[in-house]
């Protein structure tokens, strides 16, 4: 028979899970055969210890993941709050810039008002000096009164002219002094108003700057808190990596221990079969080309590790035979037919059934991988999959069934 050039890669994860499940179920089973029971019990004890460590590491890993999730959420909230604070600080900086512009404008207004006030003061001083000088001149001219003006005038017309001139000079000087003084007072009020506005703006700016300083301090505190949480998150993630590595190591250790146990159990089964008074039934090396009376051939080569209808704790009658073979052993169709089932079936793991017609079918359980599909026509001896220990299983083997009208019968009556 031509063998395939390349077989599919096995699903190691499914295999490991199946092995772990089988290991958990076999702790209380008695072991028959020549292998020392204590040796298998010791292996099982190591498996139990490793599984306990594995469970503890997984619990620690879940705790680390939960903590990392909380820290990530907190860090995200810190980031959101920092974004809000940055927006508030930017708004305050804009307000401060506007206030500074207003303050510069008021400073310029105040400077101009002060300059104008100073000019008015000088004007008032000059006006007062002129008025004072006129009063001195009048006094030094012996304080001319109305009689002096009358006596010194040349006629009535001249008299009126002189008196009117004197009155206008005095009135004008007095008016100038009064007006300048009024303007000076008004400008003083302007200076006070501008100064008050300038001070109010300066106070507002100081208040805004104080608020900005408080927000920036809060920003710094939040940034520090976020950095601390990020450092803690980094440590937690390192712990996660370490735990995941530990889990991988322990899982590999369990797989090795399970393999050792399976080998011990297989050795025990082989020894029991060899010492049986009924002799040992072994499948031939490779599929037999010669047909039995039923026309079937052996699907694999290996010892019968569990006969038909052997009672088990979970079933009264084993519905087939178990043929002990290593993982990855090619499985061949016992007879030609149509694939009726090809998939995962409860405790059988990867499971294939072939309908041979006439109410007869054969089934193949615990496969590593399946090489055929439902509805496919297969010939006798054709490769249909590879053996392993998927589903409920106690070590690599092929579970082989022959069914008549759906009811399991002893396959040994159909094999050569």
Image (spheres, grey):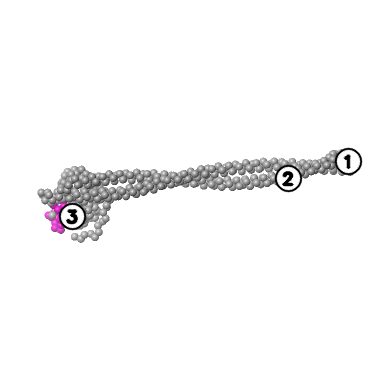
Tell me the tag on residue 151. 1
Residue 117: image location, x then y, percent: 69, 44
| Gap in angstroms between the C-alphas marked 3 and 2 | 128 Å
Tell me the tag on residue 300. 3
| Residue 286 among magenta residues | yes
Is any atom of residue 308 visible in this view?
A: no
**Residue 140 in the figure: left or right of residue 209:** right
For disc 1, the neighbor class at 10 Å (few under 14, some 14 to 19, many from 20) is few
Q: Residue furthest left?
A: 277
Ranked by sequence position, the earlier of labels 3 and 2 is 2
What residue do we see at 54% from left, 47% from top? Answer: 94
Q: On the image, numbered disc 2 is attached to which residue?
A: 123
The label nearer to you, 3 versus 2, is 2
Q: Which residues are magenta?
A: 281-305
Quarter of the rendering containing residue 122? top right
- SS class of the residue under badge 1? helix
Quarter of the rendering containing residue 334? bottom left
What residue do we see at 13% from left, 52% from top? Answer: 281
Residue 234: image location, x then y, percent: 39, 48
| Gap in angstroms between the C-alphas marked 1 and 3 | 164 Å
């Amino acid at each position: 028979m031509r063998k395939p050039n390349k077989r599919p890669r096995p699903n190691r994860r499914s295999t490991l899970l199946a092995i772990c499940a089988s290991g958990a179920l076999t702790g209380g089973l008695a072991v028959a055969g020549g292998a020392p029971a204590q040796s298998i019990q010791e292996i099982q004890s190591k498996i139990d210890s490793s599984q306990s460590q594995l469970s503890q590491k997984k619990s620690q890993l879940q705790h680390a993941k939960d903590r990392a999730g909380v820290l990530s959420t907190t860090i995200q909230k810190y980031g959101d709050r920092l974004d809000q604070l940055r927006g508030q600080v930017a708004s305050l900086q804009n307000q401060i810039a506007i206030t500074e512009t207003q303050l510069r404008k008021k400073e310029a207004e105040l400077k101009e008002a002060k300059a104008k006030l100073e000019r008015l003061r000088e004007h008032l001083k000059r006006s007062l000096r002129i008025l004072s000088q006129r009063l001195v001149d009048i006094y030094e001219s012996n304080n001319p009164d109305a009689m002096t003006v009358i006596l010194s005038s040349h006629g009535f017309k001249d008299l009126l002219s002189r008196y009117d001139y004197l009155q206008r000079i005095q009135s004008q000087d007095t008016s100038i002094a009064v007006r300048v003084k009024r303007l000076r007072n008004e400008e003083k009020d302007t200076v006070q108003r501008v100064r008050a506005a300038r001070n109010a703006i300066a106070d507002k700016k100081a208040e805004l700057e104080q608020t900005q300083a408080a927000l920036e301090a809060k920003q710094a505190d939040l940034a520090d808190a976020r950095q601390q949480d990020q450092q803690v998150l980094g440590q937690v993630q390192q712990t996660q990596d370490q735990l995941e590595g530990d889990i991988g190591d322990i899982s590999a250790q369990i797989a090795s221990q399970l393999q050792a146990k399976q080998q011990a159990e297989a050795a025990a089964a082989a020894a029991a079969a060899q010492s049986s008074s009924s002799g040992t039934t072994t499948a031939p090396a490779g599929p037999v080309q010669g047909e039995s009376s039923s026309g079937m051939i052996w699907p694999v080569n290996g010892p019968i590790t569990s006969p038909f209808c052997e009672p088990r704790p979970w079933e009264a009658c084993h519905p087939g035979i178990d043929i002990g073979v290593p993982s990855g052993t090619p499985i061949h169709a016992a007879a030609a037919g149509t694939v009726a089932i090809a998939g995962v079936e409860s405790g059988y793991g990867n499971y294939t059934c072939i309908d041979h017609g006439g109410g007869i079918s054969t089934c193949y359980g615990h496969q590593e991988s399946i090489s055929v599909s439902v509805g496919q026509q297969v010939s006798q001896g054709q490769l249909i999959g590879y053996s392993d220990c998927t589903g409920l299983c106690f070590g690599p083997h092929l579970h082989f069934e022959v069914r008549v009208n759906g009811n399991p019968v002893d396959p040994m009556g159909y094999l050569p």
